[in-house]
Structure formats: C-alpha cells, structure tokens
Amino acid sequence: MPFLNLGLCHSITQAIKDLGYTAPTPIQKKAIPLILSGKDLIATAQTGTGKTAAFVLPVLERLNKDRKLRGKRIRALILTPTRELSIQVAANVAEYSKYLNLSSLAVYGGVDSEPQKQRLIEGVDILVATPGRLLDLAHQRALHFDELEVLVLDEADRMVDMGFANDIDKIIERLPESRQNLLFSATMNDDVRAIASDFSDSKMSNPAVEIAISPKATTAPTINQWLITVDKDTKSALLSHLIIEQKWDQALIFIEKKHGAAKLVDQLAKRGIKAEAIHGGKSQAMRESILADFKSGKLKYLVATGVAARGIDIGSLSRVVNYDLPFKPEEYIHRIGRTGRATALGEAISFVAMGDFKNLCAIESRLDHIIKRKEIAGFPVRKVVPVSILNYVRKSKAPSKNSANKSGYRKDKNIEG
Ligand code: AMP
C-alpha cells in the first residue's frame, strides 16, 4: 500500500518521497488512519519501526488543515525522554513538514533557555520537548498550553524509567481537556498504563485505541550476553585464557578474515588448545568434515568466518564468541542466535576493541540495551572503549547535523530533567 492511500496531503507525501520512503511501515499503516480520524492512541512499538513518522505525519496533516497560531502558544507537544531524542524527532518534523507552513522547535535542558524563549514568542506549531525544560519554560510563562490540540508521549516507558512520571502528570494537568493523546512506548507495563489511563480519564467518550507492532527480531532471553573490552594484540591470549580458566566445553568463534582464522588456530595450538578453522579458502569436503567433528563433540573449538559459518545449525551449542565484532547488528543477532536455542542456556561473548566502538553502538542500539561488561584479571586494556550510546545512528544513515558529531555517534547521552 503506498503512502498516497493513507489520507495525507500531497505536500506531506512529497516530502516523504524525497526521503526515499516508498511504502508505510506496519506501525504507520495502523496508526496513521487512526490518528487522522482523531482517536487517542496507545501504541507499542520500538525505535526502528518508523514510529516517529507514524505520529508526526498525521499530526502535521491535522495542524495543516486550519492554521491559527498565537504568540507563546503551541499546537502540538511531543514529549521525549532525552535531549538527543528531542533533537532527532525535531529533525524528522522539519523534514516531513518542509513543504508546509508549520513551525517546529526542540527545547531541552543543558543549554541556555533564552534562545528557546525567543523562538516561543511568536508561537510554535510543533514543540518537541524534554519534560524538565518544558516545565521550566511554562513556569517562566514563556509558553502557554491553552491552544494545544495534540499531545504525544514518545518512548513513554523510558520516560517512566528515568523518573519523569511526576513531571508528565504536572504537564498533563496544565493541558486543555479537549485534545488528542498519542502514547508510544517500546514496552507496556503498569506505570506506562497509569499514564495512559490519564488520557482516558480526560475523554471518557473517546477511549484510546491500542495497537502493538511485534518487536523486531531480537535476542532470546536464554542467551547470557557479555563482552570484554580488549586490546587487539591480546585477543588470542585472552581467548586461550578463557577457554582454560573457565573450562569451556565448546565454542564457536567468529572471526573476520580467513587468514586471521588460520593464525588464531595456530596461536591456540601453541597454548595447547586444539581448534580448527572453516573459511571460504577450505574445500567443501574439509569444511563438512570439520563441522561433523564439531557437531559430534570430537572437536571442541571451531573458528569460523561469518560467511563460512552461515548455515551452521548445531542443536545445543553452549557458547558463541565474537572474536571480531560484526559490522551489522543483524549479523550479531544472527550469530548469537546459534546458542541458547529453545530453552537451552547459552553464552555469547564479544571481544570489543577500541576500533569496534561504532559497531558496538549500532549493536546495542539495535538490542536497545547495553551488553554487560566483564573484566578479566590479567587483561587490563590500554585503549578504553567508552560505554556506548543507545539510539546510535550510523553516519551513512545521514543523522541530522545537530544530532551527531562528525564521527557519526552522539557525543553524550544527556538526560534532561
Ligand atoms: P523510527 O522508528 O521512528 O526511529 O524510524 C526508524 C528509521 O526508519 C528512521 O531512519 C526513519 O527515517 C526510517 N523510516 C520511517 N518510516 C519509513 C518508511 N516508511 N520507509 C522507509 N524508512 C522509514
């Protein structure tokens, strides 16, 4: 189904076309018609599903119909948990509304509020805000909510986790009773439902519709994931150490390059560990024989390049090691999915060197959580790998110039009060 059939005006569909979106995502297909019909909505959808456009596009359509804007007034409010998300959502709003005569602004803490107040003097159609700064501005009478038409709570579960439930209550108290409410959350729990019930209270005659988009393929809870930060030149010593010290019964070890695989097998052999490698450079017969040995348990440690390992299906593999971290998050999920199958418990260990930092950010953003880190005595790192930033956007995906620094990842994950 193309965007054209969703009931959005040409100026919006053209902006979307310019961005290369050809068809709506599942959340967009479900949410856009409901929002356009004026319904309140409670949607369970994770980042990456296209949820931002799912609420921004119909809100733009609504606001564009009948534009009247007075000074210090806002017509739509999008609340987000973090500064970086505010910036990102505001950048999306600007892109989607580029052919419309609608104004938008992001306000968040940690920066001078004066320019934000100046921008609010004329009034703003769509304000994207973190709760703390919004309340500050409201207390200072820099903006008024009496003409607000739509409230959006984005990543409501994260706002609750970050302790914003009270601030959200205070904000909702200030809003006009008659408004459209949209709540988006990656997960649903009682605290999020408590916020959602505020919506229904204000409009009993128009109960909120609930929709859920099944989460993206993610990792099984039976997989114990952890990582070790390591310098490149100590990786093989660390692997040998873990195999011996932790008495690993079995490990499928992923490595980037085929010559690296052969070298690692030699390095392990020098430390008394028998491993074999499969990679594209080995004959099919050799690969099959090695794989058969690994499956039967005759061979305990198998070093494989990503390509060669495709199609390996081993019933109850107890451990996967990312000796090199994959570039794509999907590859990470796929690799570690070879362990912890069904109800079996599995372990997925990643070696992360400084050069892997961006890949780590991408993987953890995709998982939507930070992977637990372990330190191994005797293996201090010279190059410390920083804790990564969730909501990481690769440079190739063209993050807005405000939201990312030159290397493509956000400098800090500021949490705004
Ligand atoms: P979100 O879930 O809102 O964080 O969006 C994830 C990514 O999907 C963003 O980079 C959007 O630009 C992109 N996106 C949103 N809707 C579409 C679509 N219909 N087609 C292609 N990409 C989209």
Image: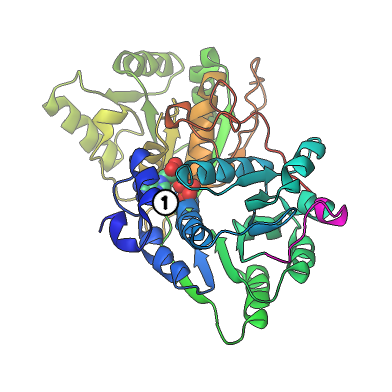
- Compared across the picture, whether 296 is left or right of 324 comes to left
Which of these two is toward me, 401 or 220? 401
Task: Residue lying at the far bottom in this picture: please name it.
Answer: 205
Identify the residue at horizontal 59%, vertical 42% (top origin).
370
- The percent coordinates of residue 138 (x first, y second) are 82, 56
Q: Secondary structure at mark 1?
A: loop
* Residue 261 locus on image (x, y percent): 34, 19
In terms of depth relative to the viewer, which is nearer, 327 or 207? 207
Nearer to the camera, 92 or 66: 66
Apparent side of residue 148 relative to residue 89 in the rendered image (left or right): right
Span colored in magenta = 137-147
Magenta-colored stretch includes residue 293: no
Q: Is residue 383 visible?
A: yes
**Quadrant assignment for the N terminus:** bottom left
Q: Position of residue 363 (x, y in %)?
A: 48, 37
Classify 357 as above or below 38. Answer: above
Quarter-of-image position of residue 392: top right
**Main SS type for the magenta part?**
loop
| Image quarter of residue 197 | bottom right
- For residue 32, above or below residue 251: below
Tell me: residue 310, above or below residue 102. above
Q: Residue at x 55, y 61 (%)?
A: 184
In the image, what residue occupies the spot 51% across and 24% down? Answer: 356
| Quadrant in which residue 155 is drawn | bottom right
Q: Dot 1: few (<14), some (14–19), or many (≥20) neighbours within 10 Å?
A: many
Q: Is residue 143 above or below residue 234?
A: below
Residue plotted at (78% across, 68% down)? 174
Q: Is residue 243 visible?
A: no
Check disc 1 and report the residue beneath it: 340
Amino acid type, label 1: Gly
Left or right relative to 411: residue 7: left
